[in-house]
Image (cartoon, rainbow, N blue to C red):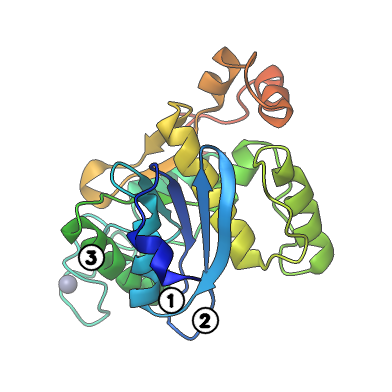
Amino acid sequence: MKYADLATPRPAACVGIDLAGVAHRETGVAVLRDGRLDLLTTAGDDTEILALAALAGRGGTVAINAPLGLPRGRCCLDDDCPCRHDPGTRSRESERALLRMGVPILATALIKILARRGYRVAAELRRAGCEPLEVYPFATLRLLGLPSAGKRTQLGRRRIHHALQELVPGLDHPNASEHQLDAVVCALTAQLWRQGRARAIGAADEGLVIIPDVAVAAGAADQAPTALRRVAEAGEPYRVDDPAP
Ligand SMILES: [Zn+2]
């Protein structure tokens, strides 16, 4: 990327970050500006990620695929800290709510390397005046009725890419990595949030997770892209308050 671009003021954008647990693994980053994909790239260390997050601009939105909050009662995620009481302090309410909705997700304490990096990046963003959103691209895809399986294979990625093209103008990256595709979905979720078409699940003290609000998408069906309209017409498939299966 050209760092000179960072100095040029541009309208607020949505930046999606599919965060890797460590710097030597690929972090995917996508920037949506005025609803169009403006940049799809890959980042490594925290400095690079924060520079790309700054592309959101003042008033923009940064959405990260990583836990950004601790389970209630935990002061850390260290296995030998007295704050750990298994299994009660492993997961957060947001994760339990997603499981009740039929969306598999790993508990925070089981992905602690990623979670620690999530807290670190989120703290840096807050210092810079940006409150990041926590998102979960797999949940977004599932709730929007889009393909979500097989992203480790080229065929699976192409199916997801093709489905996303209808929702994300400017997406024309058939060789995008799984992390780049997840970053696009993160940015799309941020955009739905800004449009009032997403909702927060979980408990505020543990960090909320933003997911598409399929019921609101139904109300906005006339202006919604076809994929959202299809979801709306089919009715909301899941609700947080559904009893556990
Ligand atoms: Zn602790």
Q: Which mark is residue 25?
A: 2
- Give whichever of 237, 73 is nearer the camera: 237
Q: Is residue 74 above or below residue 191?
A: below
Residue at the extreme right: 155
Question: Pointer 2 and pointer 1: residues touching (CB < 8 Å)?
Answer: yes
Q: Residue at x 16, y 60 (%)?
A: 127
Which amino acid lies under the numbered mark 3 shown in the image of this protein? Answer: Glu
Reading the image, the residue beneath label 1 is 21
Reading the image, the residue beneath label 3 is 124
**Disc 3 packing (10 Å; few <14; some 14–19; many ≥20):** some
Left or right position of 161 against 55: right
Q: Secondary structure at mark 2?
A: loop
Q: Secondary structure at mark 1?
A: loop
Which amino acid lies under the numbered mark 2 shown in the image of this protein? Answer: Arg
| Camera-side mark, 2 or 3 | 3
Residue 6 is at least partly visible in this image: yes
- Mark 3–mark 1 Cα distance, whole angstroms, equals 16 Å
Which amino acid lies under the numbered mark 1 shown in the image of this protein? Answer: Gly
Q: Residue at x 34, y 42 (%)?
A: 202
- Give whichever of 6, 197 is nearer the camera: 6
| Image quadrant containing the C terminus | top right
Mark 2 or mark 3: which comes first in sequence?
2
| Camera-side mark, 2 or 1 | 2
Q: Quadrant of ligand 1?
A: bottom left
- Mark 2–mark 1 Cα distance, whole angstroms, equals 7 Å
- Mark 2–mark 3 Cα distance, whole angstroms, equals 20 Å
